Image (spheres, grey):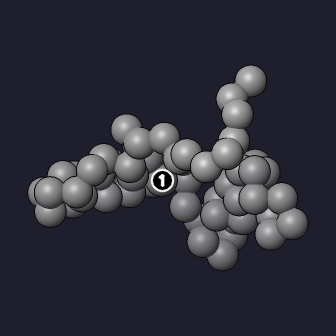
Amino acid sequence: MLADPGRSDSLMRLLAGARWRIGAADLMALRDWSSFLARRRGGRDPRMTMPTTAGTRLR
């Protein structure tokens, strides 16, 4: 997971395992709650922004 951060399946296995027991529905609820808090504070909704990197060309 640390070697390849794009592997969300590894993260889901870790979070859904016996130690943490966090499911997909829990993560979606956390995302919704954090978006609500960001809007309430006047921040942007992180789901609506696209990361940009200077000098990167889209293909």
Which residue position holds label 1?
27
Q: Residue furthest front?
A: 55
Quadrant for the C terminus, please: top right
Where is residue 39? Give x, y as percent. 18, 52
Does the rendering let one see residue 33?
A: no
Q: Residue furthest bottom?
A: 19
Where is residue 37? Give x, y as percent. 21, 60
Q: Circle 1 — which element?
A: helix
Q: Quadrant of residue 55?
A: top right
Q: Quadrant of residue 5?
A: bottom right
Crowdedness near tag 1: few (<14), some (14–19) or many (≥20) residues, C-alpha within 10 Å: few
Picture residue at 66% right of the left edge, 75% below the top: 19
Q: Is 42 placed above or below 45 here?
A: below
Give the residue type at disc 1: Leu
| Relative depth, front residue between 41 and 18 | 41
Relative horizontal placement of residue 19, taking residue 52 as reference (left or right): right
Q: Is 1 placed above or below 49 here?
A: below
| Relative depth, front residue between 51 and 54 | 54
Picture residue at 83% right of the left edge, 59% below the top: 4
Relative horizontal placement of residue 11, taking residue 22 as reference (left or right): right
Where is residue 33? Give x, y as percent. 28, 55
